[in-house]
Amino acid sequence: MSTADIEVKDVRKVYHKDRIEIPVLDGLNLSIPPGEFVVLMGPSGSGKSTLLHLIGGLDSPTSGSIRVGEAHLERMSEHELTAWRSRHVGFIFQMYHLVPVLTAAQNVELPLLLFKIPARERRERVKTALAVVGLADRMDHRPNQLSGGQEQRVAIARAIVTDPDVILADEPTGDLDAKTSEEILNLLNLLNSEFSKTILMVTHDPKAASHGQRVVHLEKGVLEREEFNNRPALAASS
């Protein structure tokens, strides 16, 4: 069961191009309790992916604080963030980023190679992760022998094989047809409901967003409004 809550406080993120400041997040605040499935929506440039990367420790805020569980990310060095990410965060992207010459099992095993885990235990973890995503019979298939939906399932298995506290998904169904997208979203719901994974997902698709327990809308780097089960949140309606 996930015990990691997420607390984003007064976070600003500014990029620089030449001498020009480009603000992306502007004093954003967001709290996510353990085991919640939260969806981030908003127009391009609203800061969705930037926020996802900050929470995943892939980037650092210009100011403000980000806490995931007991980890205060803004206080950590690059080395500390790398070690923390490998244990506590699973990433799923629109592009699957599978290694073409490796089998499904070998792709899923890759994150485990960072740890001193016996080969037998690695194999068991890989088998379990692939079984969870419904690909126990595709372990020895390479990416070019799989459909797009199956490739994304392999990517999800790779994201969960370390048993992370948090799963961060950036447009995970953006490259899939409607039927396959629904299957992937149902799988994320399973990971949330049966395995208590805290999930934060970026999407442009309202139908995909309906799978989340809470939908957070960003606009120009600030939290514009929130909805719970497609109904306005109490705080937003007051």
Image (spheres, rainbow, N blue to C red):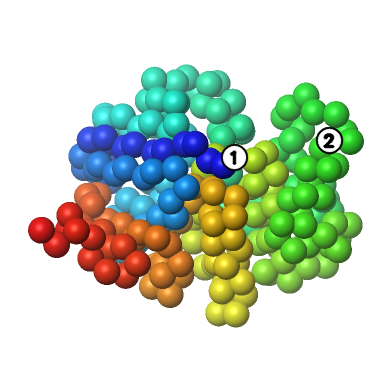
Number of other residues with Cα within 10 Å of mark 1, as a class: few under 14, some 14 to 19, many 20 or more: many
- Residue 148, given in percent of the width and then of the height, sits at 68, 69
Q: Residue at x 25, y 42 (%)?
A: 29
The tag on residue 108 is none
Q: For residue 27, which quarter of the picture?
A: top left
Answer yes or no: is residue 58 visible. no
Rendered-image quadrant of the N terminus:
top right
Q: Classify residue 145 by image quadrant.
A: bottom right
* Residue occupying the point 36% across, 45% down: 32
Q: Which residue is mark 1?
A: 164
Residue 165 seen in the current view: yes
Locate residue 84, reporting x and y percent.
Answer: 55, 28
Distance Cα–Cα, label 2 vs label 1: 17 Å
Q: Is 213 placed left or right of 219 in the picture?
A: right
Within 10 Å of the Cα at label 2, are there few (<14), some (14-19), or many (20+) other Cα atoms?
Answer: few
What residue would you read off at disc 2?
121
Q: Position of residue 73 (x, y in %)?
A: 41, 27
- Residue 125 or residue 53, whichever sits in front: 125
Q: Nearer the viewer, residue 220 or 150?
A: 150
- Compared across the picture, whether 118 is left or right of 30 comes to right
Residue at the location (54% across, 48% down)? 197
Residue drawn at point x = 67 percent, y = 39 percent: 162
Q: Amino acid at mark 2?
A: Glu
Q: Residue furthest left?
A: 238
Q: Where, by quadrant of the figure, is residue 64 drawn?
A: top left
Asked which secondary structure carries label 2, the reply is helix
Q: Earlier in the sequence, mark 2 or mark 1?
A: 2
Question: Which amino acid type is marked by label 1?
Answer: Pro
